Amino acid sequence: MSPPIIADTGGLLRALASTNGGRPSFPEYERILTSASVIIVPGLVLAEVDYFLRGNRPAMRKLVAEIFDPATRYEYELPLPSDIVRALELDARFSKLNLGLVDGTVAAVAERRHVYRVLTTDRRDFAAVRAGPRLTRALELLP
């Protein structure tokens, strides 16, 4: 098993996408998801995934069942009030990126949990974000 990851919306959607034949559409994303020792799903990410899967309710129900099944490696992470405050601080600090609340919360949860590996498609924003008390810690973007 590889170290824990935090799942961002795009990364999670790609990891779960499959072809009509049931094979992964993005095998590199699926491989990261299936090999991580823990998959942390911030609550706001789950809400955003729900938005994108509004036309595929069976897929969303399956994902929610997996996330809340204690036998899986998923951990649902409710944003703490301090995460929301930190997300807004990061959004202001990196204002040219227009991070927004969801991406800011991903970075805030990464910072709080000390899990800096992020499964994402949003390389532009997350490559520029720094976390930690002095904003010196880069996020490791997967894949």
Image (spheres, rainbow, N blue to C red):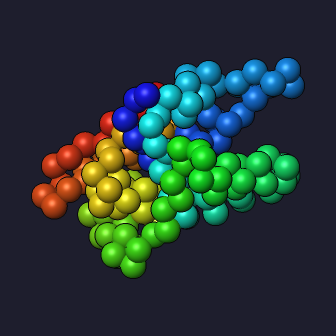
Picture quadrant where residue 111 is located? bottom left
The number of numbered badges drawn on the structure is 0
Task: Work out whether residue 131 or residue 112 is closer to the camera in this orientation and state it.
Answer: 112
The answer, for residue 37, to whether it is visible in the render is yes
- Quarter placement of the N terminus: top left
In this view, which residue lies farthest toward the front?
A: 71
x and y percentages locating residue 113 in the rendered image: 32, 56
Above or below, 58 against 117 in this view is below
Task: Work out whether residue 117 or residue 76 is closer to the camera in this orientation and state it.
Answer: 76
- Which residue shows up at 39% across the image and 79% down it? 81
Task: Work out whether residue 29 or residue 4 is closer to the camera in this orientation and state it.
Answer: 4
- Which residue shows up at 32% across the image and 70% down it? 86
In this view, which residue lies farthest toward the left?
A: 134
Above or below, 71 against 15 in this view is below
The answer, for residue 9, to whether it is visible in the render is no
In this view, which residue lies farthest toward the bottom?
A: 81
x and y percentages locating residue 124 in the rendered image: 41, 40
Say whether residue 17 is left or right of residue 19.
left
Picture quadrant where residue 19 is located? top right
x and y percentages locating residue 27 in the rendered image: 62, 21
- Which residue shows up at 64% across the image and 63% down it? 47
Say whether residue 9 is left or right of residue 98.
right
Above or below, 17 against 89 in this view is above
- Which residue shows up at 47% across the image and 34% down it? 36
x and y percentages locating residue 103 in the rendered image: 45, 57
